[in-house]
Image (cartoon, rainbow, N blue to C red):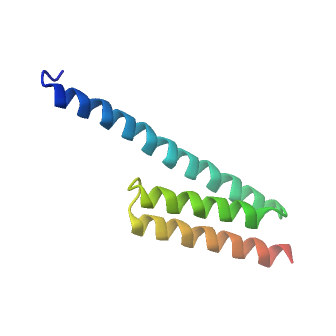
Amino acid sequence: MANIKQQKKRILIAERQRMRNLRYRSTIKTLFRGLIEAADQGADDVADRARSLEHLIDRAAAEGVIHRNNAARKKSRVARITAGAGATGS
């Protein structure tokens, strides 16, 4: 354990950031699973789910939770899933 006051603060800040990062990453994975299931079932709300997932990915990249290239790759994956759902749904 740190003895210096500033290091004690940094430990608390790092823990808070770690929990924020975990929430973002976990939520992104959960929404991906939901999007894939909705696309497979041909649900009507695939576009809404994709939009909210892309928004969350953009927020995570802006806050530094994920790298911008990682965010771009995830958004590309969302577009691929959404396009596949549109092709099979028609």
Residue 84 picture quarter: bottom right
- Left or right of 54 on screen, residue 8: left
Residue at image x 64%, y 52%?
31
Against 46, is 89 above or below?
below
Residue 33 percent location from the top left of the image: 65, 53
- Quarter of the C terminus within the rendering: bottom right
Residue at image x 31%, y 37%?
14
Residue 4 percent location from the top left of the image: 12, 25
Residue at image x 41%, y 53%?
65
Residue at image x 70%, y 53%?
34
Residue 18 percent location from the top left of the image: 38, 39
Residue 20 picture quarter: top left
Of residues 8 and 32, which is closer to you in this image? 8
- Quarter of the N terminus within the rendering: top left
Against 83, is 9 above or below?
above
Residue 40 percent location from the top left of the image: 77, 62
Against 19, is 74 above or below?
below
- Left or right of 11 on screen, residue 76: right
Disc tally is 0
- Left or right of 50 on screen, residue 2: left
